[in-house]
Structure formats: C-alpha cells, structure tokens
Amino acid sequence: MTKALYLVDSYLKESDAIVVSVTDGKYVVLDQTIFYPKGGGQPSDTGQMAKDAKVFDVVYVGKFSGEISHEVDRAGLQVGDKVHLILNWQRRYKLMRSHTAAHALASLLNQGTDALITGNQLEEDHVRFDFSLEKFDRELLEGYVEKTNRLFGTDVSVKWYDLPRDEAMQIPGVVKMAGAFPPDIPVLRIVEIVGVDRQADGGTHVRNLKEVGKIELLKTENKGKSNRRLYFKLS
Ligand SMILES: [Zn+2]
C-alpha cells in the first residue's frame, strides 16, 4: 500500500519514492507519494517524476482498487527505480485554498440555514457547490460569502487527524454531504477548522484560514429546492 504523504503534510512539494509497479508502461505505483489522487470532489495533482536526468510528466493520479496510480506521459520507468517527485505546487495550493474555503462556506451555510451539501467539485479556477435550501436568493448567498470572507481575515487554524469511527460519528455535522456516509473503515480522517467546523474528509487543506484570502461568488443557479448551485472562485 502506497504511503499517502499528502494526508499527513499537504505542504510537501517534493519527495523521493521507489517504483513498486508499472502497468502498460505509464501507470506507476510508488511506495509513497505526495500526489493527491482524484476523489472527494478534489481533482488529481499533476507534476513531474524524475529518474536521474529523465523527467516524466505526471498527467493524472487516480485510485484504482485501493492503489494510487500515477499516469506519466511516456514509458521508461521500471520497478525498483528511485524517482524524485515534484508537485505542480501552484495548482495544488489553489486547490488547498479552495477546498478549505468550501468547507468554511458549507459550515456557515449549514449552521445558518440547515442547508445540506449535495455535491461539490473543485477546479483549479473555480468551485462548484450544490446544496439543498428552502429560501434561495442571490442576496442571501452574497451575505454568506461575505460572512465567510470575514472569517478568512482572522487567524484560525486548520488541523487534520484520525479519529476512531465511533467517536468521529458523534460529532454534529461531521458529514455534511446529503445521503453520504464515510467509508466503512475503523478510523476516519477529520479536517477541523478550529471553532468553526469538523468534517470527515480525505482532501488537502491549508493550515490557517488566512491563507485562503478571499472568495468571490461567480454565479448562482436554481434547479429546485433540493438542488441549488453556486460557483465561487478565489479572488
Ligand atoms: Zn472536503
């Protein structure tokens, strides 16, 4: 099983690794990785994998039957190769800021209106956010974005840690995704915005709300009371 270094330290930009398997020449499994595999609404990381002077582009990272598989742009890597991993940090850092921003906004919206998140998708340049909400108007949502932005101006830590499943499930609102239950595993990873929100989550986040900066509401869409949608971006 690949050691997922990004779960422990989301700020790792480079690391070494050893090639454990190669499929069809370009799907590479490593002993450890800093690359986040697509999942939970967060897109995969991209970057590079270097063996000596040979540099391979990492174009996609996914989880297949529990294994983290790195798709590289061409063949040439072999089992046992020692490689150096370099993350496209600019992209990842934006995704981290967006992901933490989405949790904060979801939390304030949930606390203020009982809205449940029904879906969310982070992209490098915007976030799509689906939720259920009785009352729906742009002004109301602008208000929540503004409230969330005020929070981003304050010094609030973000932490992540594992909790036994039973203990985690006692946390009110630990699952905000409508109809979603965390995987049936004995330990859940919790992302905590201290004093604001605790959420079962496998994504990568910033360590302090100040790092988010500000967000901007781009667009709202009304698809019925159980399906409202908004788009925001980092500004
Ligand atoms: Zn999340």
Image: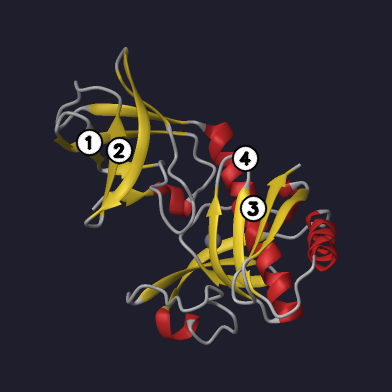
Q: Secondary structure at mark 3?
A: loop
| Spatial separation of the CA atoms under disc 4 and disc 1 | 27 Å
Q: Earlier in the sequence, mark 4 or mark 1?
A: 1
Q: Earlier in the sequence, mark 2 or mark 1?
A: 1
| Spatial separation of the CA atoms under disc 1 and disc 3 | 32 Å
* The label number, if any, that marks residue 70 in the structure image: 2
Q: Position of residue 161 (x, y in %)?
A: 50, 65
Q: Amino acid at mark 1?
A: Tyr
Q: Nearer the viewer, residue 219 or 16?
A: 219
Q: Secondary structure at mark 4?
A: loop
Residue located 36% across and 37% down the image: 60
Name the front one of labels 4 and 3: 4
Q: Quadrant of the C terminus?
A: top right
Does the residue tagged 2 have its C-beta within 8 Å of any atom of ligand 1? no
| Spatial separation of the CA atoms under disc 3 and disc 2 | 26 Å
Q: Amino acid at mark 3?
A: Arg
Residue located 71% across and 48% down the image: 212
Name the front one of labels 4 and 1: 4
Q: Amino acid at mark 2?
A: His
> As drawn, is 53 to the left or to the right of 176?
left
> As drawn, is 73 to the left or to the right of 193?
left
> As drawn, is 25 to the left or to the right of 193?
left
Q: Secondary structure at mark 2?
A: strand
Q: Which residue is mark 1?
A: 27
> Marks 1 and 4: in contact by CB < 8 Å?
no
Q: Which residue is mark 4?
A: 125
Q: Quadrant of ligand 1?
A: bottom right
> Marks 1 and 2: in contact by CB < 8 Å?
yes
* The label number, if any, that marks residue 207 in the structure image: 3
Q: Position of residue 199 (x, y in %)?
A: 56, 71
Q: Earlier in the sequence, mark 1 or mark 3?
A: 1
